[in-house]
Amino acid sequence: MRSGSNRYLANLLRLCKDQKCKLYGKIVHGSIYRTGFFGDTYLCNRLLDLYCECGDKGYARKVFYEMPERDLYSWNAFLTFSCKVGDLREASEVFDAMPERDVVSWNNMISVLVRKRFEEEALVVYERMVSQGFSPSRFTLASVLSACSKLLDGVTGMRCHGIAVKVGLDDNTFVGNALLSMYAKCGLMVDNGVKVFECLSEANEVSFTAVINGLARENKVLEAVHMFRSMCEKGVRVDPVCLSNILSISAPREECEIYRNVLGKQIHSLMLRLGFEGDLHLNNSLLETYAKNGDMNSAEVIFAEMREVNVVSWNIMIAGFGQDYQSDKSIEYLKRMRESGFEPNEVTCTSVLGACFCSGDVETGSRLFSSMLNPSVTAWNALLSGYSKFEHYEEVINHFRVMQNQNLKPDRTTLSVILSSFAKLRYLEGGKQIHGVAIRTNVSRNSHIVSGLIAVYSECEKIQISEHIFDDCITELDIACWNSMIAGLSRNSLDTKALILFRRLLQTGVLFPNETSYATVLSSCSRLCSLLHGRQFHGQVVKSGYISDSFVETPLTDMYCKCGEIDSARQLFDTVLVKNIVLWNEMIHGYAHNGRGDEAVGLFKEMISWGEEPDRITFVSVLTACSHSGIVDTGLEILSSMQRDHGIEPELDHYICIVDCLGRAGRLEDAEALAEATPYRNSSVLWEILLSSCRVHGDVSLARRIAEKLITIDPQNSAAYVLLSNTYTSVRQWDEAAALQGLMNKNRVYKTPGHSWTIENSY
């Protein structure tokens, strides 16, 4: 039995610990030494508790290591303290030296490893714990599940779930919330997390928030919104964090129109009703919601009413105006930000740069970048991406060289933008240099880099190298790389190989074609005139849900037109609710290509009646239709309406169509007069078209006159001699044709040899 003196000293130490009176505790500590009671383990444990509670690591260590005898409590107390102060090295030494351990010991070690981001080591310790027969507590499972969340280790997480069920902790709110968080992070909320939630006896705000986040991550937006409504209906406390999370939901395409504005406004109203309008983080989430939805007027109102703003708030506004193509407002907010005493950070400057380039204000963006003292790689990337967006590829390369001269190390984004520019410029040598940099910096297998390299080599007609890069990295590639390779094959007239590669994509079962994939293979079907495969892809487009995608509608229409299925093309065209100019042009061109000029003209007039403004390509298509179908007067009227009604100055292609139209109809003098009156009278193509018509109608006199013009414009152009010779032979003037051949030989004009090519139409 403990003596009265021991009990008195123990009570004093307990009182000092509760009051955190370390000074008095040290006095008691001295008394214990003087009276010879330091051999009492119980008293030493109270001393250890005192110093641990007061955070005095030096004295805690001294007491612990000088104790004559330590019991399990002593070991756990000092282990807990070492874990609490984050001394992982000492905690590990103490844990390894323990003569015996209990669940508390294991929990402490696992917890500190997770807190110090040694999640894999924490799981190893957990496995040792279970293998030694210890049953995990709710604290054990919470720590282990946290490690699984950070590692995205759903398999171990599910094993922990099984143990939780076995030991009866699956309906514990503490463990349940950890399970929900793990399933949400691992993308397993729909498959497993919802079942955990349904088994919880007392779901709280943490439980609901975890489920909402998990459903949103898996694009189950409707389910996430319903879960939030259920939370409100059940009277579960809604906090600002939960509201921020529901605001951050990113709706998929088909649900975006329904929820993106309405949901934000509903949450805004609820926020005001609950009195959270002063919460800075929530206000920033609300600002971001309105900004992303393009409602900058509402964002401005909220921003003006915010009691407190920070750099994040200003950045959201600046970026929002940029996305809304209002670079002037972005710059205005940047000035206001500085005037309010906030220092712009890298995100601010990048947002303003992006705003300028989004709005097409390249000059202001360049000037702003030049004013930056030490632009970061992110800022450089924004500049390079901006130039690339507006096809200023030479500027991209020039600025990249300046960046290199400043010894800034490009990242994957930089290299990706540069590769894109090299591909557009068909600059093979530059692509090879970037390829070398990517290999040296170990990013050559990054999907963005691989996609860029494939594009460069295929644009430069080095398709074998593209195929080698693709095959070498095939197991690590995303859909963008597959699309780049399919497009490269198509671009190099290897359309059959493009279709075969598309089939390989379908067979992977891992990646799925997107709108870009379908657009590319449909274009290949058009060039191959393969209606069979085109119909198959049409079916897959419908199944995949891309039938209403404007990126797919146009090549699908073009495929039917090129394959002669003009009525199927029109059927598809009529189902499109929102028709863009490209689709109208494609359908008009399809009618022209298939010799149905009246319908092409009818569709052209229908297009104008719908309020769609035609462009220069529209006029080329409809004038071609007039030419092929002999609708001369209508063609002349459409040509004259270009400048008069639509403000489009006719170009060479338009005049060629009408000269051809007049020539086909035998109105050769009118065609000659029009050709002379155009700004393109010195174009050889225009006169070649008319000379060809002379052969058809046997007008030798006009043919001679036009041939003389052609020879004057381009003496070495063999077309003038060949077409005039054909005109002579068409009216059986063999001597003149032979004399013309002699003149060609004398003037050393040689006819360009023809060639043919064959496509293997198999798939």
Image: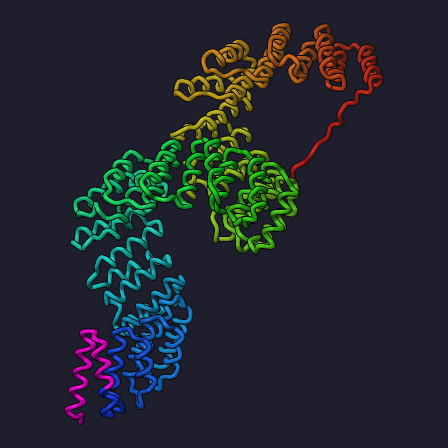
Residue 723 to residue 414: above or below: above
Q: Residue at x 33, y 71 (%)?
A: 85
- Report which quarter residue 42 is drawn in: bottom left
- Looking at the rendered image, the quarter that the N terminus falls into is bottom left
**In terms of secondary structure, what is the magenta stretch mainly?**
helix
Scheme of colours in the image: rainbow
Quick check: is 7 in the magenta stretch? yes
Q: How many marks?
A: 0
Residue 250: x, y in percent?
34, 45
Magenta-tinted stretch: 1-30
Question: Is there any visible trace of residue 666 in the rendered image?
Answer: no
494 sits left or right of 575 in the view? right
10 sits left or right of 430 in the view? left
Quick check: is 618 in the magenta stretch? no
Residue 434: x, y in percent?
60, 47
- Report which quarter residue 187 is drawn in: bottom left
Nearer the observer, 279 or 709: 279
Residue 307: x, y in percent?
23, 43
- Looking at the rendered image, the quarter that the C terminus falls into is top right
- Report which quarter residue 45 is drawn in: bottom left
Residue 252: x, y in percent?
36, 44
Nearer the observer, 178 or 72: 72
Nearer the observer, 607 or 543: 607
Q: Residue at x 46, y 15 (%)?
A: 646
